[in-house]
Image: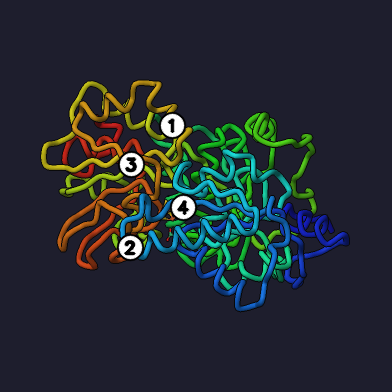
Amino acid sequence: MGFTITEKIFSKHCKRDCSAGEVVMAPVDGCMIHDITGPLAINVFHEMEGEKVFDPDKVIMLFDHQIPADSISAAENHVMMRKFAKEQGIHNYDIKEGVCHQVVPEKGRVKPGDIVVGSDSHTCAYGALGAFSTGIGSTDMAYALKFGELYFRIPDTIKIEAFGKFQSRVGPKDLILNLAGDIGADGATYRALEFTGSAFSDMDIPGRMTCSNMAIEMGAKAGIVPPDKKTWDYLKGRCECTPFSLSSDSDAEFFEVKSYDIGEINPKVAVPHNVDNVVDVSEVAGRHIDQVFIGSCTNGRYEDFLEAAEVLGDDKFADDVRVIIVPASKDEYLKVLKAGLIEKFVDAGALVEAPCCGPCMGGAFGLLAPGEVSLSTSNRNFRGRQGSTESFVYLSSPATAAASAVKGKITDPREV
Ligand SMILES: CC(C)[C@H](C(=O)O)[C@@H](O)C(=O)O
Ligand code: SF4
């Protein structure tokens, strides 16, 4: 019997053959902490009488959720984390780089075959680069910071095979929303998703990041795309690594295999208040929206803004819609800026903010009043996620978000 990618990654780290279901103590290659969960992890680290982190070069610290500090308590958290970084010799990206899940890959802090943990649920995003990366709680993080290893139950794997070509103005976000609708918010709980087939090998790294990012929205521990030339090309100049092949064996045992023809997928939207409440955009077309957010670790990259700009064309955003655009990182911001897209969006009536999580989880700014409706390219639409518990959040692709922002109501991007 062969091994899945996940089993291979754990086998390599544990220096013996490991299979799904086993509980192992495995060394980690990286630990990511940010401004929300970092302080909790650091407090527990001190309670555990932690003195030095296991390897300061393997700890990634940055601030993204509440930046620039939006409250005195946020500012205090930043001060506390800066102090910890200095004491420990950890490089702190602080408020300067953007959202954790964009910055970690961008800075070459993750590579294929790695085990990376982050005290944030969307840490599964780095599966796009062929790593086993997963979100953990702050107590687990304290342990990982101190000892550089952690207990894992090796998950079994649901293999997703996707083939075909997307229709025009349909893309990775529609695919992953379609999967969330099909598998359900708890349909992959404690399993790994493996994304395979020509649809994923044809997909660029940003598209893969969108898909891996949302693995957790089905309960999955990881969402892994087997590394290929695109992966290694992306990593060139970001980290020192020599390409190797990593894929599941043909006789590996999967919990389930699911196949999709992506040509059959229409633009999708997740309807309040669950990520798996997914329908074709056409089913809710015409619904009024008050705010559109294009950004987040799911869809805050240059390619996402280009998609939105193409749909926008020479139009303007509707007068009664607030459009908030937030690139996911400094690098992505600069790409969008240099391509002239910022000017285009501002001219069309949008607010463009500096890289951060923005309105994604109703933190720093862009909160909704009772009764208000948001269409967002982020990954969660739970009740109260972006403000009032009486507000409504729909999730979509950047193309659907832009089309809807132009029309002032939910709109199929193929009709603009
Ligand atoms: C604040 C953080 C713990 C949280 C997460 O873990 O995902 C946030 O990033 C989110 O998207 O809900
Ligand atoms: S952008 Fe949203 S989903 Fe991503 S880390 Fe920030 S709050 Fe979480």
Amino acid carrying mark 2 in the image: Ile
Is label 2's Cβ within 8 Å of ligand 1?
no
Amino acid carrying mark 1 in the image: Tyr
Q: Are marks 1 and 3 in contact (CB under 8 Å)?
A: no
- Earlier residue among tags 2 and 1: 2
Vertical arrangement, residue 64 with respect to residue 15, above or below:
above
Residue displayed at 22% across by 21% down: 314
Q: Determine whether the residue tagged by mark 3 lies in a helix, strand or loop.
A: strand
Give me the C-alpha separation between circle 4 and circle 2.
15 Å
Screen quadrant of the C terminus: top left
The residue at which mark 2 appears reads as 72
The percent position of residue 152, horizontal first and vertical second, equals 70, 69
- Earlier residue among tags 3 and 2: 2
Amino acid carrying mark 4 in the image: Phe
Residue 264 visible in the shown view: yes
How would you rate the neighbour count of disc 3 (Cα within 10 Å): few for under 14, some for 14-19, many for 20 or more? many
The residue at which mark 1 appears reads as 302
